[in-house]
Image: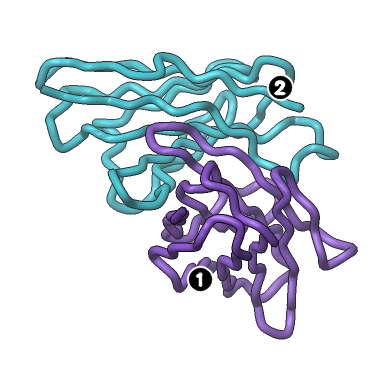
Chain colours: A purple, B cyan
Amino acid sequence: AQSVTQPDIHITVSEGASLELRCNYSYGATPYLFWYVQSPGQGLQLLLKYFSGDTLVQGIKGFEAEFKRSQSSFNLRKPSVHWSDAAEYFCADNQAGTALIFGKGTTLSVSS
Amino acid sequence: GAVVSQHPSWVICKSGTSVKIECRSLDFQATTMFWYRQFPKQSLMLMATSNEGSKATYEQGVEKDKFLINHASLTLSTLTVTSAHPEDSSFYICSAAPRDRALNTEAFFGQGTRLTVV
């Protein structure tokens, strides 16, 4: 069955430090991969997505993610974290036309 | 980009009453809409998939008689929580898949509805 794993439940990063959030997918066919961010009590905001082509994907707010088929991974990165980045981050996967399958999420805290 | 509007954004209701949540695609036609539920500090779990003009497909463990889904047009799907109880309190989010196949690789989400049953 299709699944998405986010191994880290909670990560704390110092402001200005780099960030990497891990995501692994299990579906064998070419995945459609997404990263979303959710602030408390809010809906989802799409950060970036990967369907095909260049495996390094640029998103909004300075985020990027790299698709690595050999590792079944799609990790999210940011070179310098801002306090406003503190939120819940979800990795998701789907096959075209179907519902998204979400990982359990990673809570990002930013320390000053 | 495509916009999905969800209404209301929050609602408080008494136990035993029913609540209707609307999900509208504002600038595109959606043949398929998805309904998710998110409990506090948890991920989004798919509840059901609705296709315009046909019955919704519910995920295992979701009571179809309790969570009534109607997708009567290409721009509107509704979720009705019938005889709501406190354990139904949750964050409900819809997403819509555009009819245009060129756009059909991305899901567009509503802003969510916070339901509190007292």
Identify residue for label 1: A1
* Residue under the image location 37 percent in, 40 percent down: B37
| Direction from residue A92 to residue A62 in the image, left or right | right
Identified by mark 1, the residue type is: Ala
Q: Chain of mark 1?
A: A
* Residue closest to the eye, B82 or B38: B38
Q: Quadrant of residue A71?
A: bottom right
Place of residue A21 in the rendered image (x, y in percent of width and height, measured from the top left):
56, 66
Answer few, some or many: residues within 10 Å of disc 1's Cα (few below 14, many 20 plus, some between 14 and 19): few
Residue shown at the point (73%, 50%) measured from the top left: A62
User: At 57% across and 18% down in the image, what residue appears?
Assistant: B24
Residue B104 position, x and y percent, is: 75, 41
Up the image or down, B81 lies above or below A73; here it is above
Quadrant placement of the N terminus of chain B:
top right
**Residue under the image location 65 percent in, 78 percent down:** A72
Residue B29: give its label: 2
Across and down, in percent, residue A41 comes to 38, 33
Relative to A8, residue A15 above or below? above
